[in-house]
Image (tube, rainbow, N blue to C red):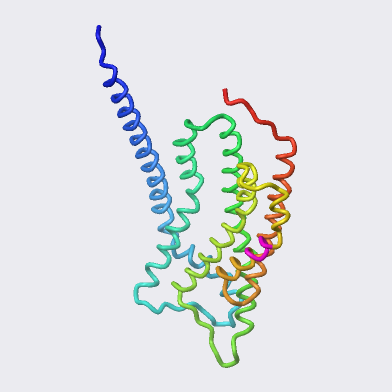
Amino acid sequence: MSEDPSAPDGADESASLMAHLLELRARLLRAVLGVVLVFVALLPFADTLYTTLAEPLLRFLPEGGQLIAIDVASPFFAPIKLAFFSALLLTMPWMLYQAWAFIAPGLYRSEKRMALPLLVAAVLLFYVGIAFAWGVMLPAVFAFLTATVPEGVAMMTDINAYLSFVLVMALASAFAFEMPVAVLVALLQGWVTPAQLAEWRGYVIVLIAIVAALVTPPDGVSMLLLMLPMWLLFELGLLIGRLLLRGRTVPADA
């Protein structure tokens, strides 16, 4: 039997590309379906979720203080936005699993051994960051802001503005808590060395202060509450990186 030397290679490449595209589509559909299902399940509790979200501010308002709705549709859409954001947070592990299942077959064993623990740590730190914002940052910020309201001024915040503020603070804290993972990736990939990071510590702290100042309100309290964990987590990532690199051996990928 004679065979065309070019046709099979082209056919194999085309089939492989199509298989990858189909796999990608399936993974994306599963991720989206997970978000939709959780969102639909949360919709009946959207108002309860918003009431819970408002608690850190309402705790510090004077008796009778409340949030207000400036736009006519805000009381309807704000809780739905919160339910959708909550669905994204709850399904993040599922979405990351779909991404991991798609890319993992193409990784070497050594890459898998490095990437999987970092991915798990990144997810856990993301949730820890949100918990820190909820339990520490927001109460401290609202206690400071409500205490500085001038006499004769009633503090009444729009529910959409409040939702945006809380989400920004929560995401800023969540991404700030990814500092150890970012440091470890940079060290393990060889982009920088522990000695270089230690030498640049002063510049890193200044950069952390700038980032904290940009993403937090201009009250100083929230800036310090975000800056301090970022610096400590940078030091933690540097310490872990030193320990890992000290006894690191290059594994075989065979």
**Horizontal and vertical percent position of residue 177:** 62, 56
- Residue depicted at 59% across the width and 89% down the height: 150
**Horizontal relation, residue 3 to residue 116: left or right:** left
Which secondary structure is most common in the magenta stretch?
Answer: helix
Magenta span: 203-207
For the N terminus, the quadrant is: top left
Q: Residue 182, how many percent across, how many down? A: 60, 50
Front residue of 238 and 43? 238
Residue 87 spot, x, y in % from top left: 45, 54
Residue 37 colored magenta?
Answer: no
> Which image quarter: residue 223?
bottom right
Is 163 or 173 nearer to us in this picture?
173
**Which corner quadrant holds the C terminus?**
top right
Q: Residue at x 61, y 25 (%)?
A: 252
| Quarter residue 61 falls in | bottom right
In this rendering, would 70 be left or right of 109?
left
Q: Residue visible at 73% across and 44% down? A: 242
Give above or below for 42 relative to 53. Answer: above
Vertical placement of residue 147 versus 214, above or below: below
